[in-house]
Every structure is written in C-alpha cells, then in structure tokens.
Amino acid sequence: MIDPGLPPEERARLQVLASLGVLDTPREERYDRVTRLAKRLFDVPWTAVALVDATREWVKSGQGVPWIVQPLEHSLAAAALRMGGQVVVEDTEADLRFHDHPMVREHGIRFLAAHPLTTDDGLCLGYLTLMDHEPRPFDQEEGQTLADLAAMVTTELTASLRANTDPLTGLPNRRGFGDLASWALANGRRTGQPLSMLVIDLDGFPDIVTSFGPDCGAEALLETAALLRACFRGSDATSRIGDARFCVLLTGATVEQLEIPLRRFEALVTEANAAREAFWSLQYSVGYAGFDPMT
C-alpha cells in the first residue's frame, strides 16, 4: 500500500489521500464548479484539481486538460509538491526549474500557478492548478484568489475525510477501511508486495460499558487505538471497523512476519493494564489473513 521506506510525513500524506476514497472516482460537480470558476476568473485554457499519490498525478476535476493521469515525472502538481507552498511560474521557458519539464515540451505550457490542497494537519494532497500556453504576470491579489478557490476544494476533500473517520478515535472507520483495503490490494497486485491484515476484537467490551459506564468504554477504545498506533509502523493502516473491532493493514508483511508486532502489542497491553488504576482491563483476541500477489 505505502512504501515503509518513505519519510513519515509522506507515509501519512499517502494514507490520508487513500482514506479519502476519491482516487479513481467519477467527476463530481462540487469539484467541477471550482475548476470552471477558476477557468473563467483567470481566463486560462486549463485548470485542474490534481491529486498526487505514490506513483502518479490523478486529475479529479479538469477544464480543458487533455489528461487524467500523469506519471510523477510528468506531473506539474508533483513538481509543485516538492517545492511546497503556492508555486507561480510566469514563464516556464525562462525558469530553469521548468524549462525542460516534459509538460512544457509536450504540451507547450508556458504559465503555471498552483496552490496546495492542504489538510488541517498540514498534509498536502495535491494542487489546484492554472495553466496557459502563453506567459503572463500573476499578482498578489490573483494569488489570494487562487488560495481561496483551493480552500473550497480542500473543504470538499476534508468533508470526505470526516465521512471516512471514526469521530472518537480519529482512525479510519469501516468505510475508510474499505477504501484503504481496495487501494492496498490494487497496489499489491501492481507492485508484487504482500499484504497482511490483523483483526483485533476487544473481549468483554459490552461488560465494561454495562458495569462501569460509557465513559470507561470510550476510554478503553481510545487506549486501544493509542496502543495500536504506538505498536505498528506509520505505513500500516489502523482502522476502527466496529463497536469494539479494530483492523490493521500491514504493507510488505507476510503472515509469518506478524509474530513480532503481535508480541509487541501484547507487551504494551500488559503494561497498560498494570498501570491503570481501574477495575477493568483490556482483553482482546486476534484474527489474521494474508494476501500474496505472487501466488
């Protein structure tokens, strides 16, 4: 799903992007209205909401752009992501960073303005981009207008994120897990990486709620989520998929390699139970499955 060798921030960015469930989906009016408005306001031939994942740029909404997918080395949005912040290139042929870029050579793009689509946590999911065949100036007021339009796109993206997130633990919910799992399986088939899945059920959770109240139940769920985050890699996707059920997708791990993280989780739970000044304790059971695209 996500290369565990990537920097932690990039792993988190890709995980959030996957959990949105917007990649490879049909066009939607809520995004199209922004790219139409941008095209009209700035009088440019091409506008796009371009999301950047591990291997490509994917256009969720575009006006005039003749592509939906570009590899990263051809992606202007990916180039902007590496630079960070709002990127304005008034004349690509006069800019050493872009004069030999494939999109400049192949599509004759002479002007680029791009504003990041950034979550509240500061993770950039892609860019709202303006492109023209002619060089042009771009002033501060225009930059603010582009930022305002990008904020509209980000609002829609984060609405999708909220719909896919468990409000108590902040983990992906069942819907978010489904999107992550679909993407993980597709990525495994493409890259040949194995994938393993752990399902952790909190045993006796209804008894905790009945005997000690819903606040203790919420505490048990929050503590379990925190222990799972502490135990597994940032590249592993942890979700809450039921009232007292959690799931972890482990990229690049076979079922045989699950013993070490499971022992680590057991030790963390034992330590937490010993330190807790309460009449209840965390008890759990585990199930697992594996996917090997090479078999």
Image (cartoon, helix red, strand yellow):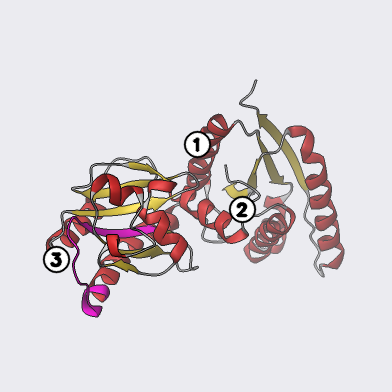
Quadrant in which the N terminus is drawn: top right
**Front residue of this view, candidates 146 and 26:** 146
Report x, y in % for residue 35: 21, 56
Q: Residue 182 has which mark?
A: 1
**Front residue of this view, candidates 235 and 173:** 235
The answer to whether 157 appears left or right of 17 in the picture is left
Magenta-colored span: 126-143
**Front residue of this view, candidates 141 and 35:** 141
Where, by quadrant of the figure, is residue 213 drawn?
bottom right
Report x, y in % for residue 175: 48, 45
Badge 3 amino acid: Leu
Mark closer to the chain start, 2 or 3:
2
Q: Residues within 10 Å of mark 1 (few under 14, many from 20)?
A: some
Report x, y in % for residue 166: 52, 56
Q: Nearer the viewer, mark 1 or mark 3?
A: 3
Residue that extends furthest to the top in the rendered view of this protein: 295
Q: Please give the name of the residue rendered at 52% of the width and 50% of the height, measured from the top-left corner.
A: 173
Do the numbered discs 1 and 2 sit on residues whose CB atoms are within 8 Å?
Answer: no
Report x, y in % for residue 224: 70, 57
Disc 1 from disc 2: Cα separation = 21 Å
